[in-house]
Image (cartoon, rainbow, N blue to C red):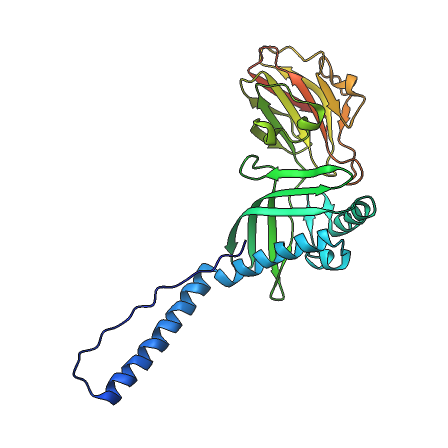
Amino acid sequence: MRKTLFFLIILMVMPAIVYAGFHLGMADAVKKKVKKLDEKVAEKKGVSDEEAIKQLYATLESSMESEDITVFGSCISNDYSHQQLTKSDWISGSQDLFENSSNIQVSITNLKITVTDNSATASFHLKMTSDEAGVIMDEDAAADPAGVLSYLIKENGSWKLYGDHTQPTYYVYGGNIPLTETGAYDPGEHGYSLLGSASPSETKTFYGPYDYYDVVVYFKNIVKIDALQKSDSSYWSAVEFDGNVTNVSNLLGAPDSVYATAGTGEFFPYTGGCVFVSSGGSSSIKVIVVP
């Protein structure tokens, strides 16, 4: 996972007949100038920051596999906030995972980092397994932009996970193959296209056309769904299935301010929620919510 940036050293060929002292002085001056140039280029490109961030993710990997909650927590900013998740949520959730899992294996690959001053983003492919659960997580930012994208901050010279510090969000995906309930929690990993997102208080139309639509909330987020409207102005009267939705029948039919709640508001043990519907020929889906 570690990459080394090699700079081209320019060799200057001096004339064959020169004064020895002049030759040595010029060579030394050139070396110093090249070194300074290399340092400036490295600083400009944030190479040292990228290496530090790569080491942060290596530490996250090893701390999860060794179940070292202290080291794991040291990688997270005290001001962490991401879709309502806090540092304490990650600590308590990871402790729960450690207590109920053995032989945890974590793989972070395809790490792509963008550094801007004292903040950065990182996208990657994260896979986590255990003896009990098999595959716990298999998320690839290349396949699902809403999946694995981390926000980082540099605090007192050290990089930490920071979160996006934005308002809660729900997502809508479209696809042409049916999904299982498990797959519906991660539709982007199963060939579905992300149609867009919105805050839980925002009613919004998402456009296909697709054979199936999937409304998804992640982490501790919840969304109160009053109704789902089709492109012909009618409303869905049935769902294929739902996951972690309370009173799902309340979202069927025309809006009446009596809603279903998608999501649990918890990080562990049950997180997120989804509503999976067949399009019935609808070229769009309008998610009507109660703020």
Q: Left or right: where does residue 244 sit relative to residue 107?
A: right
Figure quadrant of residue 188: top right
Q: Farthest residue in the right direction? A: 99
- Which percent across, then down, holds residue 190? 60, 28
Residue 249 position (above or below residue 115): above
Question: Percent from the top left, x then y, of residue 249?
Answer: 78, 16
Relative to 266, is 177 above or below? above
- 149 lies above or below 48: above
Residue in the image at 74% along x and 22% along y: 242
Residue drawn at x 60%, y 47% as measured from the top left: 108
Q: Quadrant of residue 222?
A: top right
Residue at screen point 76% across, 37% down? 133
Quadrant of the rendered image containing residue 170: top right
Quadrant of the frame with the C terminus: top right
Q: Nearer the viewer, residue 191 or 289?
A: 191
Give the total of numbered labels. Answer: 0
Q: In this view, does 99 lie above or below 69?
A: above
Q: Position of residue 210 (x, y in %)?
A: 56, 18
Q: Residue at x 40, y 68 (%)?
A: 38
